[in-house]
Image: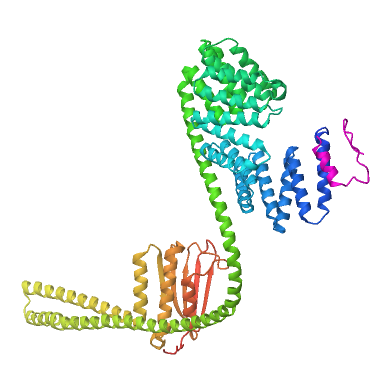
Amino acid sequence: MSCDKGNKKKVTDKSSDSISIYFSLVKDERITKENRLKYNKRVFEIINTKKNSKENRENLNEIGINYNELKDHKEFRKVSRILLANSIEEKDTLNIARALKNLGSYQLDVGQNDSSFYYYLKAEKFAKYLKDSVSIGEILIDKAFIQINEGDFNGSEYSAIKSLRFLHKSKNKLKIYDAYNIVGACSNQLKNYKKALEYHYKALNYLKTNNLNSKFHLDANSLNNIGYVYQNMNMNEDAVENFNLALNTKDLYNDNPSLYAMLLDNLAYSKFKIKDYSEVSNLFYRSLKIRESLNVDFSGIILTKIHLSEFFAAKKDSVKSQQYANDALDFSKKTKVSSDVLASLKQLSLVEHKNSGKYSKEYIRISDSIQLEERKSKDKFARIAFETDEIIQEKDKLTEQNRTLLYFFIGTLLLGLLLFVIRTQRAKNRELLLKQQQQIVNEEIYNLMISQQATIEENRVKEKKRIAQELHDGVLGRLFGARLNLDSLNRFNDEDSINSRFNYLAELKNIEQDIREISHDLNREKYVLINNFVAIVSNLLEEQINSFEADLSSSLDESIQWDKVSNAVKINLYRILQESLQNINKYANAKHISVEFKKDNEHISLKITDDGIGFDVNTKKRGIGLQNMQSRVNECEGTFEIKSKKGKGTTTTVLVPLEKKVTEV
């Protein structure tokens, strides 16, 4: 047997596992909270051993409600989640709605308003599907509480008024009272005082008509709300009357000390506003003492201190006025409630004139921040509602689409595989065709380069002929004239003749030097023009030297007979050299470059070296340029090697057969 003092029920061993008995014990308020929680846990353990039946889901819902009433939020959430999972498994719409509603209630209790709003929205959808008007109304009330807490007074008022259309069948008449109260509170915040009074009086009359008063003294709460509206309307005589009526409620201080302290503060403030200073300070002090002893209503403590600051400021006691205002600000910063901080800053700016500017700036900054957050909250709830609708619609669409996709996938799988094979084959054919076209284009480019070089060579030949003519007609003429004059002067030995001979000998030396220089120039040109490919490569290297800062040294083996090398090999070697120089200029940051063409047995070796930054050839992904170089080497049936290390430069080596003959396309 397990029981508390005052409990006359006995639980025998035979009935110890009876769920109904345990539930009755959980509801028995004479039993301690600790033992009631134990009984509720015992029921939960029993149900967990049973199958997921409708009866067990109903019991899970009741267990969750019991945990919520006993303020065990952690277990309440746990049970609600299990109920939701079990209900979804069995497509139990009613209990899905209940579980979602319970989770919304949990999130509201722990201050997670956005998550709570989300769960309530989903619960509302299921309640509408079930046409459960009572649940819809109760959910709307809870949504209204969330919205008023987040400062969305218009949204809260709308939800509360809407709930009244659904709650007329509800047995929980306190929800209707809450709806009237919320509308009145929202109207008061929106400065629609006439409507606020209307709904607060409706709430008070509803209490009396339905005899709903309890130990929480809801009638005193409504009178306080009415008095607060009158206070905001600056009708403080009417406010004092309502506050006094509420304070005269029997046992109010013992049953609800928090409400009692609030009424004392409101009464004192209204009396202060009508300059009835009798007992004002005493009322404020009593209110503050009660609130501080309860240590729960922190905003109330701050408000009373602000009111005391106002009171002492009116009494010209600046020291106490500033003291209470500073106390309020310090306490509000600890609680981190923005509205309390704002009220404290506003009061300090009024009573502490030397720092008024500082407090005003801080007030404006926090006020702007609060307004921004309020706008975000309003947008957040609208967004949650929109996204919830979207999710439900998307879920329905996805269910339908999944069926269609299943058949479509099976039907198109084989077709897709067939198309893949066809596309792969076509891609290979296109790649082969592109390679053939590239080879043709390379040949055409090389032929154009050869043609251009031939034109240059032809012009040089013409220039040589012109120079030969000049030598024959000019230089030889000068030589012939000098020789004839020297022959005629040999007959005379006078001083003038001797001087003339010396002059003609000097002229002959000049002519000799001119002929020697022309001969040397023509001889060098001859070797440069031995082969067009060598000239093309030389032009590329000369362009590299002129365009970039890196020093370049080159070596071309004269033993290579380029006329025996196919055009395809020569154009590929030229393109590889060109691509290598471009890569060095772009990435290597080299100071010196070396290019070497060398005959290696029956092969041509091209070696390009730089002292640049280098790279890790094992990890570096090959770009399109390197891939093209490899492709060109493969086309020539040669080998291609790159050696490089970070900070040690790069060496590129290409080896191709000397007599390689590429099939013409």
Give residue 65's quadrant in the image.
Answer: top right
Q: Is residue 145 visible?
A: yes
Q: Main secondary structure of the magenta part?
A: loop
Q: Residue at x 61, y 64 (%)?
A: 399
x, y percentage for residue 363? Answer: 49, 28
Front one among 629 and 560: 629
Viewport quadrant of the C terminus: bottom left
Query: What segment is highlighted magenta in the picture?
Result: 1-28
| Residue sitting farthest toward the front | 209
Front one among 500 and 117: 117
x, y percentage for residue 453? Answer: 30, 80
Seen in the picture, residue 127 relative to 375 is either above or below; the reply is: below
Q: How many marks?
A: 0
Q: Tell me if residue 10 is in the magenta stretch.
A: yes
Q: Residue at x 71, y 27 (%)?
A: 215
x, y percentage for residue 169? Answer: 65, 42
Q: Is residue 274 left or right of residue 102?
A: left
